[in-house]
Amino acid sequence: MSLLAVAVDAKKDPGACFLRVPKHPLTAKGLATPYILKNGNCDQTNPEQQVFVEATIFDPDTKTFGVYHPLVINEGSEPAIDPTVPTLPKNAIVGIWFGANANSVTLTGHTDGCVNGLSNKDIFGQVAFCNAENFFKVVHEQGDVVIPPIGTDLHGNPCPTTRHFGIIDQDPSDNVITTYLRKGHRFAQATKANRKKLGKHGKFVEFANGSDNALVASLIDPAIKCTPFMAPSYMEPDVMLGSMALNELHAGKQQPPLALIPAADPMVLSNGKQSIKKLNAYRRGVDQPLVTKLSQANTKDYCRNYDKIAPPYIHSIAKQLAKRPSPSAAAANNLLTFMGQRYAASWVNLGCDKVLKKTSAITVTVDKNGVAIKIHFHQSKPIHNIRA
């Protein structure tokens, strides 16, 4: 959801984070071992540098899912409360997804089976994953796994998913739903017991990833009376959680047109150029169909659908969005203005203005601090003398 610009060479990027993956990350012990955020560029106490880890577990014997949030701590520190060691099913298939509020995250340590991009010099940016392709492969091979229907919103329309053109941006299907607790410079999993324990001795902070997945499941869905796909927490009983993987499985039920990763998505560019290899590497991690040529992920088609669907869709639920808080107070004063400024920025960042030669159908009024306070819907206007 953050506005990335390019594929990243992590070592040259001052906003790059390096995250050490523990031994045996797909096991119960590995899941409960904190990931270490390397000192230097990033600090987990800084909202613009935080990194998040999210595991989704599939039990092929019962054909059910669960969610677990491995903890991230700063190098040289200890958890505020030790992570819960999950009890995994005998034949559990674990997939792990990463998100970041920083410019990028590069995985180090025990990274077998992990995908960060094409290499550590050509990473996606804020996203990485471990065992994701195998996770989705096993789920689909079962054949009779129950994925809930998408459902309908308060207007009777199909609920949006992470592949709905009405709510996506220039880099869809990114980041995670995980949240953590912080007390001072130490961190803990966001469970009821941990909130209670940390709250006994002063204030704590719960913080989240700036995520397309969280935007849909945690903000838009409740506003329009939709229900995301959720599964039991492996950290505590009687709690249901969403996840990136569950969102993508749910999105598989959406009817076309589908907002699949386009070739010009900044996260899949390689040295500033479109790359079928990097595009497919990302798509494997979010359960999207692969392409054999870049024209199958044509950005112009993506922009046409974005232009046709997003402005009227946002307008149709404007009253509901305006009543909800913005996920970023620095960007917008409520969820409606956030969605509007996000659309307007994505229109330019993805190059829709150039490939379609037309202006954004949503414009934004900002205050003196650059915070979006009002959005305007209008007909797009042709742009002349602009190079695609």
Image (cartoon, rainbow, N blue to C red):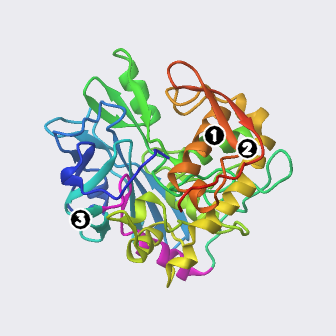
- The amino acid type of the residue labelled 1 equals Met
- The amino acid type of the residue labelled 2 equals Ile
Q: Along the horizontal axis of the image, is 187 left or right of 169? A: left
Alpha-carbon distance for marks 1 and 3? 35 Å
Residue located beneath label 2 in the image? 314
Residue located beneath label 1 in the image? 339
For residue 47, above or below residue 7: above
- The amino acid type of the residue labelled 3 equals Thr
Identify the residue at the far front of this view. 385
Asked if the residue under mark 1 is in contact with the one under mark 2, i.e. CB atoms within 8 Å, the reply is: yes
Q: Along the horizontal axis of the image, is 340 left or right of 91? A: right
Alpha-carbon distance for marks 3 and 2? 40 Å
Question: 10 Å neighbourhood of mark 1: few (<14), some, or many (≥20)?
Answer: many
Q: Position of residue 354 (x, y in %)?
A: 57, 57
Alpha-carbon distance for marks 2 and 1? 8 Å
Q: Which mark is residue 45?
A: none
For residue 48, above or below residue 124: above
Residue located beneath label 3 in the image? 111
Q: Is residue 267 magenta?
A: no
Task: Tell me which corner region of the image, top left, top right, bottom left or bottom right, holds residue 76.
Answer: top left
- Viewer-nearest of discs 1 and 3: 1
Q: Work out whether mark 3 precedes mark 2 in sequence or the reverse, and give the earlier one.
A: 3
